[in-house]
Amino acid sequence: MDGALAGLILQAELSDLLALEAELLDERRFDEWLDLLADDIQYCMPMARNVRHDSLDQEYTRPGRDASWFDEGKKELALRVQQIQSGDHWAEEPLSRTTHLVANIRIAGHAADEATVHSRFIVYRARLETDIDLIAGKRTDVIRREADGWKIARRRILIDQSTLTARNLTTFF
Amino acid sequence: MKWQIPCNWKLAAENFAGDTYHTTTHLSVDRLGISPTGEKKRHTFAAVRLPVDVLGVAIEGKGHAVRAQIYKDDFEYSSMYATLPEVDAYYREQHYKRQRRLGERARLLNRGGVVFPSMHYNSAGRTTIGIWVPLAAGQVEVWRWMLVPRNAPACVKDMLRRYYLRYAGPAGMTEQDDMENWTSIQRALSGTVARHYPLNYEMGLGRERRGWPHDWVGADAIVCEGTSENNQRAFYERWRQLMGAAS
């Protein structure tokens, strides 16, 4: 029973973390969002390809080797935040309005101070008058317990689109 | 890399043909310094004062355009990868190898441009080729390939990969602002007032020179020194010819 209870508590804690993260992004509290990331975070969004049914292992590009939409660490993510906050980053001036819906949260595994967490998302982005982008996908996170709380240490994002219908990716996933 | 932009393909094409004056588009990324030099600005060569002139080169009658830099006198390698010694050593070696292979012609650096009508490329610290695929009058799809030198060390390939991914494409901190502006321009052009006035592409008109500053640049090269719209005029002139031609 203890194990099951501990599992439920972990699920609740990490679900709350991911919900908080979505709130911070939607409220443009980007500096606080950066604080949820471990200093050594690897943040990757591979690209999808259209492949034969028997070649699905090649459906997504390989982080660290191939092209990806994002393949970066905290330094680059912080630069992006700085750019969004600059006031003359035209792609985010005026700022987009986003809603990050995160669901299907499951703890796929956990050891001492780390948990592997699966989730799915829809990010709705409205920009200018009528520009709407809807991007759905899946995430696999490694979330680590550090001295000052849970931090996202690794994130792999798989979006469903191959050709991107949005003209930019100026939010985080 | 494939993605879509809600603008006419020619807005993107003319940007690659000759965009030397669009600095205000990229104020935000230049301030951060995203190039591998670790310094301000987005281009590797912005971190050093390369002893070059800027040239806009159009190939007569064809619509092709090149954004070039040409070394004036001093032809030595300027270290652009101070934070990455192994990368810097590689580019230093390549600089002089290229000089030995091309001789005087190595003075000319082709930084990017268009192969008319819709092929575009960049080779300014990162090498890419691409196609603008017109989907509709107000929509284009981009097909973009990033190239790395086959025989370069892994650290060079990795540097290029990561630099390119944060520079260009929908997640590119530089190109995001180009695309936002093309989108807005596309919409502004459809207005009643905008439709009454032709766009002005006269920058540098009358300053063009043929096969300049060296004969080997080519007799079919129409060259304008510095910032100009020489390239855009050549691109649109060829397009206009083809659009007006009898089928």
Image: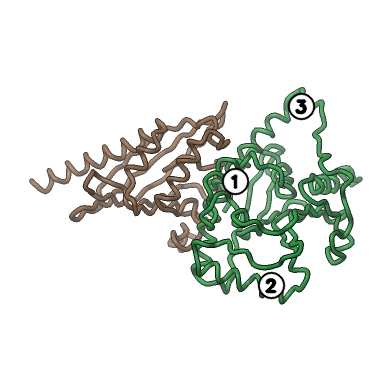
Q: Alpha carbon of mark 3 to alpha carbon of mark 1: how far? A: 25 Å
Q: Nearer the viewer, residue B178 or A19?
A: B178
Asked if marks 2 and 1 touch (Cβ < 8 Å), the reply is no
According to the picture, the residue beneath numbered tag 1 turns out to be: B175
What is the display colour for chain A? Answer: brown
In the picture, residue B139 is in which quadrant?
Answer: top right
Q: Nearer the viewer, mark 3 or mark 1?
A: 1
Which residue is at a point 21% across and 39% down the rendered structure image? Answer: A12
Looking at numbered disc 3 in the image, what kind of residue is underneath it? Answer: Ala
Looking at numbered disc 1 in the image, what kind of residue is underneath it? Answer: Glu
What is the display colour for chain B? Answer: green
Q: Nearer the viewer, mark 2 or mark 1?
A: 2
Chain to which the residue tagged by mark 3 belongs: B
Q: Is residue A172 above or below residue B220?
A: above
Which residue is at a point 87% across and 47% down the rendered structure image? Answer: B207
Q: Nearer the viewer, residue A104 or B229?
A: B229
Q: Position of residue A44 (x, y in %)?
A: 42, 53
In the picture, residue B107 is in which quadrant?
Answer: bottom right
- Extreme-front residue of the structure: B74
Q: Is residue B57 left or right of residue A54?
A: right
Looking at numbered disc 2 in the image, what kind of residue is underneath it? Answer: Arg
Sort mark 1 into few (<14), some (14-19) or many (20+) by Cα contacts within 10 Å.
Answer: many
Chain to which the residue tagged by mark 2 belongs: B
Residue B98 numbered mark, or none: 2
Sort mark 2 into few (<14), some (14-19) or many (20+) by Cα contacts within 10 Å.
Answer: few
Q: Please report whichever mark, 3 or 1, sits nearer to the chain's N-terminal start.
A: 1
Q: Position of residue B44 (x, y in %)?
A: 59, 57
- Extreme-right residue of the structure: B246
Q: Position of residue B20 (x, y in %)?
A: 71, 47
According to the picture, the residue beneath numbered tag 3 turns out to be: B194
